Image: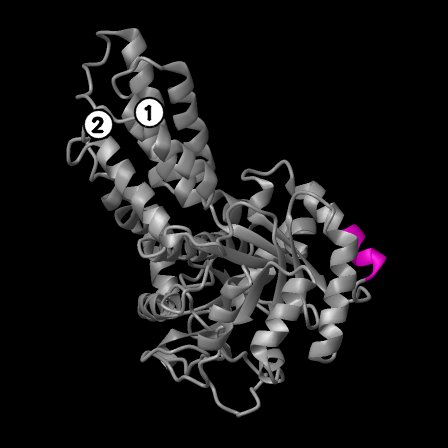
Amino acid sequence: MLLMVLPGCAAPAHRFPPSMPPAAAGVDPAQDAQTRLIESAYRAYVLERYPLACALFQRFVDSNPESPRLSEARWWLARSYEQRGDIPAALAAYRTVVGEALRSTPLAGSYEFHALNRLDAFRRSLGSSSLLERRQIGLWLRSRDWLAVPDVGRWIAQLADAGVTSLIVEAGSPLREPVQSGLMGVYFQTSKVPVVEDLFRVIVPAAHAKGMAVLASLNLHEPGWMTVNPEWGVVMAIRTDQVFQAVGHVDVLHPDYQRLVGEVAQDLLRTDIDGLVVEARRAKGFAEEWSPTSRRMFEGLFGPSFDSQGQAVSPDAWRWAGWKTRAYLGFAARLTQQLRQTRPGLLVAVVVHERAVFSPADALREYGEDVLETKERGLHLVVQPEPGLPEGSYEQGAAMETVRQRLAPTSGDERQLWLGMVLGASDPSSLVTAVRATVATKVGQAGTHLLLMNGPAIP
């Protein structure tokens, strides 16, 4: 997997040369230690282990205040924070690279020069609705909710008055839940897939006018918003010649599908959204699914598997599920990097089941979810509640607190974590009432973002 991931990640990193040529090893033990430390930090960055890269670059900065490579380390510390999604820390680090007061114009190509450019880019892109400085009270609304609202602007104003600070809106029609028009497609302007209705043109300006952020949700595993190319499909099988059934999911690892998702996401970015939420897989069976493309990719790294008669067999379930999950999250991280070239402050979150916290092994095999890997990639994490608990109940609140406590020791900080709670209101007016009541009891709790979800928890 690293052979596939590294080329796409390493190219931007090598644009900036070291502040000084590396010295011959053994000449100066102190300088050798500096070199090893900064190279370890840089390696963590290239491998997209951004929390580790932040810690190592910070250690270099703290322990080597007189080093000629200090600007280099500070620059990559800022880049690591940015890729991790901690924009306030990134801004502070970039300002440190620039210095409190410039005595002269920095040389083109220097770390100071590039830090100034990044700060200018942030100033242009970050508005009053950015998800950077405050704890969020988010509300996730399905397309059917928006289609039932007679006056979107007025309703958004009521939600803002009720305490909602951000909206998560479906960008495309969901699988097996046809919209009122019966059409398949997305709710923003794009030439890549069908367009049902341009809801984002109305929702985003109205929300921003109230100081609310807007995140678009998109299902990549089961894209009900497009017709899937048969070549991108996955099947369930034991042997390569014994296909049980086509399961209707798409192979997210297929290069052509990833290319299309990137193009659609770029068009979605033009709606001025503040973030992207990658929805959770709904159906179990992740470890049993494969496609010819992903099978070839896997065997290119690990070699083919054969039984005692020399027949090809399915890969070991644990290695197969683990590799597919890491490759999928690697794609999500690369998509984030791509979109942040246009929108530096963009937030990208991945939704997982509660099972990924309480039963990580089951979630890996059933849904391809890995909480630790997600956070280490610098992606935000949305924990969606399991079905069965009464909507808005004490049990839901207790489960949320348990999730928060279990994830507290993991890498990343609480600003990466969104905890979901199901409301289940039946109409727009009752939804505002339910939001107001829930916010009144939950808003005082510090730490993670709260995500109110209008609809049943996913299976």
Q: How far across and how far down the image is residue 155, in percent?
A: 63, 74
Q: Which residue in the rendered view is the most extreme toward the right?
A: 394
Quadrant position of the C terminus in the picture: bottom right
Looking at numbered disc 1 in the image, what kind of residue is underneath it?
Ile
Q: Main secondary structure of the magenta part?
A: helix
Magenta segment: 393-399
Is residue 164 visible in this depiction of the protein?
A: yes
Looking at numbered disc 2 in the image, what kind of residue is underneath it?
Pro
**Residue at the disc numbered 1:** 38
- Look at 39% across and 63% down and name the residue there: 253
Quarter assignment of residue 69: top left
Task: Give the structural element (helix, strand or loop) at label 2.
Answer: loop
**Residue at the disc numbered 2:** 18
| Cα gap from disc 1 to disc 2, whole angstroms | 10 Å
Q: How far across and how far down the image is residue 9, in percent?
A: 30, 47
Q: Earlier in the sequence, mark 1 or mark 2?
A: 2
